[in-house]
Amino acid sequence: MIPFNEAFELIMQDIPLMGVERINFSISLGRVLRQDVISDLDMPPFDKSAMDGYACRMQDIDKTLKVIEVIPAGKIPERFVSERECSKIMTGAIVPGGADCVMKVEDTEVPEEGYVRYTGHATRSNIARKGEDVKTGAVVLRDGLQIQPQHIAVMASVGCVEPFVSKMVRVGVLSTGDEIVEPERKPGPSQIRNSNGYQLFAQIMRSSAEPVYYGIAEDSAAATREIIEKAMDECDVVLLTGGVSMGDFDFIPGVLDDLGTEILFKTVAIQPGKPTVFCKMNDKRIFGLPGNPVSSFNTFEIFVRPLIMKMMGWNGSFPTYRLPMGKKYRRKKSHRMSWMPVMIGGDGKVYPMEYHGSAHIHALSDAHGMIALPVGATELKEGEMVNVRPI
């Protein structure tokens, strides 16, 4: 049994990097960008009005001004603003030549038709200058980020309509055990529905990877080997749930060994998730995850998801939030790192979920995140600051 940090380091060593492909930017949400995105123009591309008002010369602001033109957004000004003149202008419109400020419309009055007077005490220029946000040739998005809605807006603004992104990691999911049946079936005596497989399928999708479900393998080494070989042939990462502990029908470690994979560890000092197997063969990565749903959920989040993201060239890190405990928490044993589901209350404090063990999947239903108690720690005091990892 190895410590969590050592297991994580073994997983993150020599990560194979996925290739790249071009896709339309409008469907790139969640993908990992594999190029710097460069602006092809200044932004703003011209001096533009930051509000509705009147464009004039600052030195004339205390005078009654003649309105010589109306400039809506999208129109090129036709008149040059001279002494005692102004142009009525809309937000986002090009500021006409000669003008160096815009009087807000709410700070003006119309003494007679065709004229305007400023009623405020002072004004800024209220002009967004050409290139003040971004200069032509500037990097606006960097290689390695996971694309979010705001990044799609940036790509649209600079005409990057077919960015290079990482190819999706193809992740195979296989459940094991004669006691497991598919969700559409009602379990018989001694059977349970397969929640792990579909939970992992969804976690893979949330990681912007491509899940492939291989069903449930019966409890025999031959059947398990056949499906694992198929999944390894077709996928970049293979996830197996169940069959990794010490029972008479737990075949996976032996099958992986027979297949010639390099097994880097078989157990990890974490709770839940101790019977976690990790091995590799060339550029393939294989995980044997525990059969209990909370264990498989946690081990995916702390081990598999980071690997998938790094395989796609992601250079980010998962956020954590530093928050105070809302109540005291104690545990009896402390020889393993404990990952515990928590919720964040309306008071901004952290509260442990009612948790009956690694089979209690409903404990995650209302959880906002997880916190880790290190080896040797038995207590968290009310008010003590903890790191919450969102889930």
Image (spheres, rainbow, N blue to C red):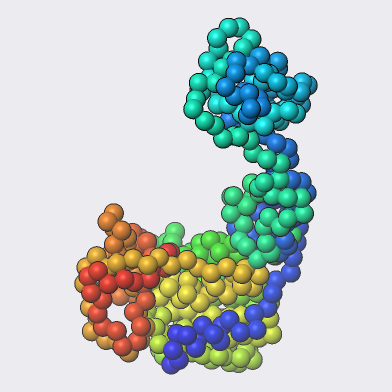
Choose between 171 and 253: the one closer to the eye: 171
- Please tell me whether residue 6 is drawn above or below residue 388 in the rendered image: below
Q: Position of residue 63 (x, y in %)?
A: 60, 18
Q: Position of residue 300 (x, y in %)?
A: 49, 73
Where on the picture, by quarter, is residue 358?
A: bottom left
Q: Position of residue 89 (x, y in %)?
A: 65, 24
- Relative to 84, 137 lies left or right: right
- Residue at point 62% right, 89% down? 261
Quarter in which the C terminus is drawn = bottom left
Choose between 129 and 185: the one closer to the eye: 129
Whether residue 38 is visible here, answered yes or no, is: yes
- Relative to 256, 345 lies left or right: left
Where on the picture, by quarter, is residue 147?
A: bottom right
Q: Position of residue 209 (x, y in %)?
A: 60, 64
- Relative to 292, 89 lies left or right: right
- Please tell me whether residue 362 is drawn above or below residue 290 in the rendered image: above
- Residue at point 73% right, 50% down? 135
Choose between 290 and 15: the one closer to the eye: 15
- Residue at point 69% right, 74% down? 17
- Residue at point 73% right, 62% down? 35
Whether residue 170 is visible here, answered yes or no, is: no
Quarter in which the N terminus is drawn = bottom left
